[in-house]
Amino acid sequence: MADFAAKPTMGSQTPHQSKAPSRNLKDDRHINPSPHPMTKLSVGGSDINGMSARTSGPPSPRQKKAKASQYDRFIPNRSAMDMASSQFNIARSDSDQPLDSATIAYQEEIARACGVSINKRILKFREEAPTSEKDDLRQVYSRPALKAGASTGTKRRILNTPERVLDAPGLVDDYYLNLLDWSMGNMLAIGLDQSVYLWDASTGDVNSLCQLEGDAYISSVKWTADGTYLAVGTSDGDVQIWDAESQNRIRTMSGHQARVGVMSWEKHMLSSGCRDGSIWNHDVRVAAHKTAELVAHSGEVCGLTWRADGALLASGGNDNLVNIWDARSTVPKFTKTQHTAAVKALAWSPWQLNLLASGGGSYDRHVHFWNTTTTARLNSIDTGSQVTSIQWSSEYRELVTSHGFPHNHLALWSYPSLTKIVDIPAHDTRVLHTAISPDGQTVATAASDESLKFWRIFESRGKSIRSGKGDTAASMLSSASTSSSHGSGSAVQSILDVTRPSYIR
């Protein structure tokens, strides 16, 4: 019994052994680890070795969701923060100088364009709840019903096909000439080689107004404001005045040393631009017609137009200049040099008196907008093509530009956003001239492919602007003949009942 009691049982330890564990046992563990190590378990956020109902492993989907939704109310969540908006707002708040309203509005516009939120909280502590993108059916089905007969509005349609096509044989392919104009009497004048033809939009009749002799050719045409008389410029420097109703030549004003490529009326005053760079003002009431000579262009004058109030005259030339002239002076009020090609396209806005648009040729292809009061350039458009003419709409805040190389098209632009509304493939060759109808709805284009086309671009949204006989120009066009018989013997019917003004002698 004594021997049995003195011998320790397996697994028991003496008090001395419990205080000093064997170094050999520790070394054996390090060298020969157990094939079944003790697992590390987690219960209630604390780690316990050896006792748990579930061993550690991949977290369940429920655990992932619970872990992702846990946030600390004092530590911001970076994944929920809009860093771009935060940096923008910090920069605004650090500015020491007070900003005026214009600068603040400019910064807000830039921020909106860049997609940056203004006055947004910098720190975020949790993700925002998702918003429903579906319509609230309670609001959809509780909307008041439309009243019977109420106008729901119609979308504006702009066709890319012409309403009418006429032949224009013999049209001179020259960028610097101005051979098309549409009168207030709904009469379209076009210069074809040595002849001027009148097309009556109300009847479709075509009549030859005049025929030049020798080597001279028609270089420009321009109606008076009332549409009664037509000025005809020739290649030999003469300016002729014709009565459209009687088809008689009233007078011839000579003096230019080269062709007259552009003209513009201001009541009894006719301004003519010459190839030698000079501009003459003619008073058609008196025998000594030349009243002033404006010299500031070194190249051919190919663009010329008076402002509606007659206070300013805009001119463009082959020297790439735009000159603005005061009616009381023979020296330009100011000159613009931003164009890099000839400036033929010039047009005053019909609803903003001091707004002028100018377009450049093949090496420029830009349309610039000028404030003629402050002389500032307001904006510009890179059209991508040679600009040959500009026509403003009197009803819409829009303008249409005609183009040559390389696209030979019409482009419709909104103003002042200058966004392109539509491109219209107009002709096979460059569009040389445009004219707008008296009601402002139809644009006529003439190109070097010897065709004359009519486009319904500015369709009226309200009541039609009626002519003297009570018909719109658009309805006249739809009832007119589609073919042109040059030299028709029928007499021209005047649309407006007007008498010869006293200033024509």
Image (cartoon, rainbow, N blue to C red):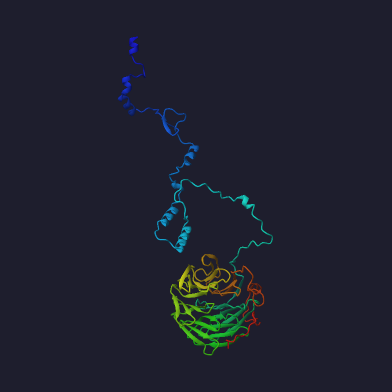
Q: Which residue is drawn at the image coordinates 32% and 23% (left, top)?
A: 19
> If the image is split into quadrants, where does the C terminus sit?
bottom right
Q: Residue at the top extreme?
A: 1
Closer-to-camera residue (143/172): 143
Q: Which residue is drawn at the image coordinates 32% and 26% (left, top)?
A: 26
Q: Is residue 453 above or below residue 116?
A: below
- Percent position (x, y) of residue 268? 55, 84
> If the image is split into quadrants, where does the N terminus sit?
top left
Q: Is residue 183 above or below residue 100?
A: below
The image shows a total of numbered marks equal to 0
Image position of 69 (left or right of 35) = right
- Percent position (x, y) of residue 103? 44, 62
Q: Residue at the bottom extreme?
A: 287
- Percent position (x, y) of residue 140? 62, 52
- Percent position (x, y) of residue 331? 44, 81
Q: Is residue 215 visible?
A: no
Q: Quadrant of residue 25?
A: top left
Image position of 59 (left or right of 461) = left
Q: Is residue 232 visible?
A: yes
